[in-house]
Amino acid sequence: MAPKGQHKYSVLLPTYNERENLPIITWMLVKAFKDNELDFEIIIIDDASPDGTLEIAKQLQAAFGADRIVLRPRAGKLGLGTAYIHGIEHATGDYVFIMDADMSHHPKFIPDFIKKQKEGNFDVVTGTRYALGGGVHGWDLRRKLTSRVANFLADTLLTPGVSDLTGSFRLYKKPVLEAMIRATKSKGYVFQMEMMVRARQMNFTIGEVPITFVDRVFGESKLGAAEIVGYLKGLITLAMDI
Amino acid sequence: MGKRAQSILLVFAAGTAAWVLLMLHSVLIPFVPVPQYLDEIAPVLPLWLLVAFGAYSLASIGYALVTFGDCPEAYMSLLKEINEAKTDLKRRGVQID
């Protein structure tokens, strides 16, 4: 099968204990790219998951081919920013997708991202749950309220001009992603947010596409007091820094 | 401190200075005529600003909460796809728990 475009898309999937989710998200990614006749590779960056995620990743590589599934394991949990750097070091695509491996982000939106990117030749295209056509499934009122307050605070303090700051389903031009990761200092929850703020500062153009977000089907998504405090600390640090 | 924090501080300082000037205008700038109504609203101006910002915040969060998009159909179709994926993956020799 000959790809119709000359572009190649690398998907970075950082994993930690995603033994259940990884095969299914990989299968859905392969399907989305093949159905749309796009050239792609999926780079799995596993941080030595004790549940044997890497072993499953090897089986996926055998099933779909080493040109499609690339394994870039690391010795331990070393953070999201360095995972992306580690992943793009050997990425052969000129565009890079970043998404969660837990199936909360659905690969069916990949053609929308690519279409949007081409429309405005955007440096970054970010998925938004908060635009018409987007949405979230599996959140109770408390979780929704927390998300809205978090987004309102970030929006007021940082004025990034992006409707979904904490979302992490995004398409980047590869050199743009490299430059942005180098400029980003924070870790954890604030990382994705800072990436968008830095993108604005560096005058990169950003497009938005609506996406749906289905909260983890397997495993648990946690949001406790510690996470909220961590978020607020990171937000204030970032607001003071820009 | 970054540029943004500096400019927020600058705006805050300028606003405070303007308010102090307004409150003490009869002492600081007795030669400038100030209308009576300004004297009446000046003491509550900071409180009014605080309440206005609070009201704006609540309204904006409330609106966003009411218009929060749900997507039950995305969940249903995902469950179907997961089953489809599992069947195909098993066939390809990938271990599924």
Image (cartoon, coloured by chain):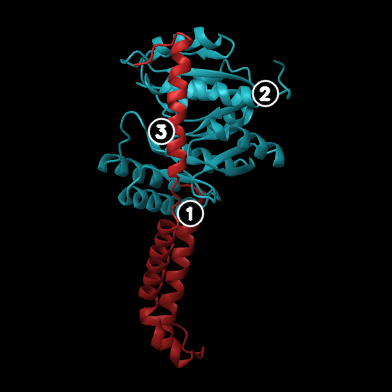
Task: Give me the C-alpha separation between circle 2 and circle 1.
Answer: 50 Å
- Establish whether labels 2 and 3 are both on one chain: yes
Could you tell me the amino acid type at mark 3?
Lys
| Residue picked out by circle 1 | B6
Q: What colour do you see for chain B? A: red
| Residue picked out by circle 2 | A37
The x and y percentages for residue B17 are 44, 71
Secondary structure category for the residue under label 2: loop
Q: Nearer the viewer, residue A155 or A24?
A: A24
Secondary structure category for the residue under label 1: helix
Quarter of the image for the C terminus of chain B: give it. top left
Could you tell me the amino acid type at mark 2?
Glu
The x and y percentages for residue A18 are 37, 22
The x and y percentages for residue B4 are 50, 52
Could one spot residue A52 in this view of the protein?
yes
Count residues near mark 1 (Cα–Cα under 10 Å), then give few for <14, some for 14-19, many for 20+.
some
Q: Nearer the viewer, mark 2 or mark 1?
A: 2
Find residue A230 and report its image quarter.
top left
| Residue picked out by circle 3 | A187
